[in-house]
Amino acid sequence: MNNAIFAVKNHETAASAAVCFLQPAHQLPPVWLLAPFILLLLMIATGPLFYHRFWERHYAKLSIGLGGVVALWYGFLIEHGPGMLLHTLEEYISFIALIAALFVTSGGILITIQRRGNPLVNGALLFSGALLSNLIGTTGASMLLIRPYMRINEGRIKPFHIVFFIFIVSNIGGALTPVGDPPLFLGFLKGVPFFWVVSKLWLPWLLTIAALLLLFIVFDARVGKGEARGPEIKGGVRVAGVQGFIFLAVVIGSVFLDPALISGFPSLQDLFHLPFGIRELVMFAITVIAYRTADREAHEGNEFNFSPVREVAFLFMGIFVTMIPALQLIQAYAASHGGELSVTKFYWMSGALSGVLDNAPTYLNFLAGALGKFGMDINSVADVKKFAGGVSSGFPGDVPSDIYLMAISLAAVFFGAMTYIGNAPNFMVRHIAAHANVAVPGFVEYLYKYSLPILLPLFVLIWCFFFRS
């Protein structure tokens, strides 16, 4: 969304000045315009379960159709609506460029682990994936490891194996660096120091990962029993398609090709008014090159096809558009209630919404609200650095500003594991597992059987230990 964010220097107006919309307040979207977004979420939840064949054939049309309803409203009935749609298009192109590049490059790398899955081997692989996600992102780590993870557990794999992979590798693991997850990278672009993330979040990250690994090992020892197919093998790791790692490095490096990071770096958006930049061009080029030069053995071993990324592309196209009014209403609320929001409210609200919305703009909206509470401007790098360093708001009994940033950062990344749509890798992992004939829980089952009973208590403990006071 096109925001004009500014700061004030007194606490009476800081809350209402966190975010100022370019359009007047009376042009906020009507609440009923949330209906396409809610309907799309309901169909994503129920389609694969109750009308599978219809959903598989028509999910792209349904997603585009519901997104079209919202796009028509903003295109013709809101004064600054076309600009907001263009900004959403820019975000979507950046999103799909990175997702496609990581999916295709990792699909050309075949990792063969010459061991049979057991609780300790699986736990070690998941922990390695959590660490790796901070280097190549949660999408890169997920796409690189999900297939070898399923292969070593062939014949004994259960739904919880896939769920814990999503919890640890596809989401929570990537909370230590700006490369790990998009919200943290956006914070870095705004001025949060690169190593602030690991210095502030390593302890809650470690506690959460340790708790999840312990639970997983217990489940795997008690429930994940079964005969592995083939003879027992003890050996090392074999990799085919090693050139894919070079492509992965180029993709991750291209993430930093941004005018906000490199002074004087050309912006195609500003020069030619294009909805993409040099970064996206590099990513799309690497996608094509990596696919055409991929190792055939790696593609065959990974059973590579484009259906997972195609599903993500169409569904998230609809999600990006239909969530515009939801994000706009969140912005308005953060702007007008920033002074009333405690660190607890920032934690739970940014977390809950990150589970069903794109966590990157949700992170930015609440970060803007928190900065406004402290009389600071999200568009000022100096203000964001000062905010990350920890300053007092002046409100009696309030915590320093860096605690607010911790709460928003943790919630945006961790709560992405609450649903399949909380983070794009979740959808892709689910799709790959389902097409490999692995039992995966449906949308609602994932929520009530796994994320709510397992993750929510952990997130409550994180809140108690780090944010309650």
Image (tube, grey):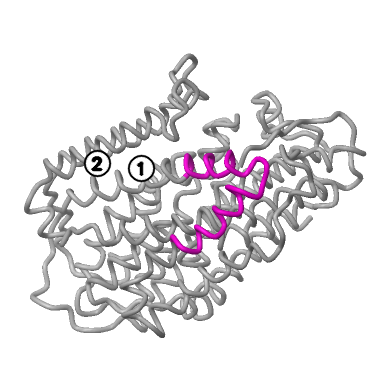
Asked whether the residues under the numbered discs 1 and 2 touch, taking CB atoms below 8 Å apart as contact, a structural biologist would say yes
Q: Earlier in the sequence, mark 1 or mark 2?
A: 1
Q: Which residue carries the number 1 mark?
A: 97
Q: Name the foreground residue: 32 vs 184.
A: 32
SS type, badge 2: helix
Residue drawn at point x = 41 percent, y = 71 percent: 216
Q: Is residue 452 above or below residue 177?
A: below
Q: Residue at x 30, y 66 (%)?
A: 122
Magenta: main secondary structure: helix
Crowding at dot 1, Cα within 10 Å, few <14 / some 14-19 / many 20+, comes out as many
Q: Which residues are magenta?
A: 64-91
| Residue 208 marker | none
The x, y position of residue 336, in whole percent, is 82, 48
Tell which residue pokes out farthest to the top in this image. Answer: 264
The residue lying at 74 percent from left, 44 percent from top is 369
Judged left or right of residue 205, residue 146 is left
Disc 1 to disc 2, C-alpha distance: 8 Å
Q: Please give the count of numbered marks on the rendered protein.
A: 2
Q: Is residue 454 left or right of residue 130?
A: right
Disc 1 secondary structure class: helix
- Amino acid at dot 1: Ala
Q: As rendered, which of 51 and 387 lies closer to the eye?
A: 51
What kind of residue is marked 2?
Answer: Thr
Image coordinates of residue 85 in percent, x first then y, are: 54, 44
Q: Quadrant of the C terminus?
A: bottom right
Where does label 2 land, which residue? 287
